[in-house]
Amino acid sequence: QVQLVESGGGVVQPGRSLRLSCAASGFTFSGYAMQWVRQAPGKGLEWVGDISYDGSHKYYADVVKGRFTISRDNAKDTVYLQMNSLKTEDTAVYYCAGGLRYMDVWGKGTTVTV
Amino acid sequence: QSALTQPASVSGSPRQSITISCTGAGSDIGGFNYVSWYQHHPGKAPKLIMFDIGNRPSGVSNRFSGSKSGSTASLTISGLQSEDEADYYCSLYTSRSTVLFGGGTKVTVL
């Protein structure tokens, strides 16, 4: 079935780095734009950034621009979120989602605590 | 700075109808056509329930409907059921190819 599974979350000190992965299955990953969305404790959903189906275009929220990088490996059906210079305010559940204008498949999230 | 504004909470009794609004402001909202809605039960993955204003994905109940007037999009839930109790978020794909989320609306079934 259609599935996204995030991994790589954990506890990290401020200023350090962490890389999240999101493995896709059950759909044609190479044809899908992918997004990262996060939810801080007690807060709403916040868009982090996205990457086009072929990795040629990437867009980021201002609050993570210059610190976070999204990449993908279509041979492995996996999208990544490299997070550098982490801040306490980056503490959140991080979701990957598939789609561009709308996100029609979501993972269950992975928790990052800074 | 562009933003989407939703009411913090909406409540209704079983079998009633409720409407959640989502108002956009700012230069990035464009024609405000690429609005989608997500249902989020705490601890679970968010679920797409409406896209491009008023289109329902396959498998989503027809009790959910979407509309737009100017820069305000609305999600209506008719025949409210206990399982509809969740957080609901509107989202907009902007003219800058970025994504905005509204602040979320907590729906309570009385």
Image (tube, coloured by chain):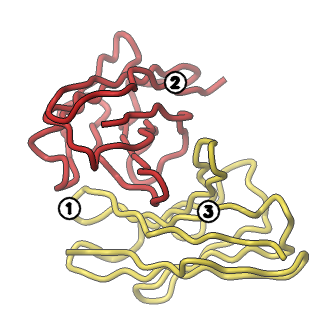
Chain colours: A red, B yellow
Q: Position of residue B110 (x, y in %)?
A: 84, 76
Dots 3, 2 in contact, CB < 8 A? no
SS type, badge 2: strand
Q: CA distance from mark 1 to mark 2?
A: 28 Å
Residue closer to the observer: B28 or A43: A43
Residue B75: name its quadrant.
bottom right
SS type, badge 1: loop
Q: Which residue matches tag 1?
A: B96
B45 relative to A43 in the view: left or right:
right
Instruction: Please give the name of the residue rendered at 38% of the width and 11% of the height, measured from the top-left corner.
Output: A76
Q: Which residue matches tag 2?
A: A5
Q: Position of residue B36 (x, y in %)?
A: 50, 62
Dots 1, 3 in contact, CB < 8 A? no
Pointer 3: residues within 10 angstroms few (<14), some, or many (20+)? Answer: many
Q: Position of residue B79 (x, y in %)?
A: 86, 74
Q: CA distance from mark 3 to mark 2?
A: 22 Å
Residue A88: name its quadrant.
top left
Pointer 2: residues within 10 angstroms few (<14), some, or many (20+)? Answer: some
Instruction: Please give the name of the residue rendered at 54% of the width and 60% of the height, measured from the top-left corner.
Output: B51
The quarter in which the C terminus of chain A is drawn is top left
Q: CA distance from mark 1 to mark 3?
A: 27 Å
1 and 3 marks on the same chain = yes
User: In the image, which is nearer the foreground, mark 1 or mark 2?
Assistant: 2
The tag on residue B41 is: none
Give the chain letter at badge 1.
B
Q: Which residue matches tag 3?
A: B87
Q: Residue furthest bottom?
A: B70
Dots 1, 2 in contact, CB < 8 A? no
Instruction: Please give the name of the residue rendered at 58% of the width and 21% of the height, measured from the top-left corner.
Output: A26
Residue closer to the observer: A4 or A7: A7
Give the chain letter at badge 2.
A
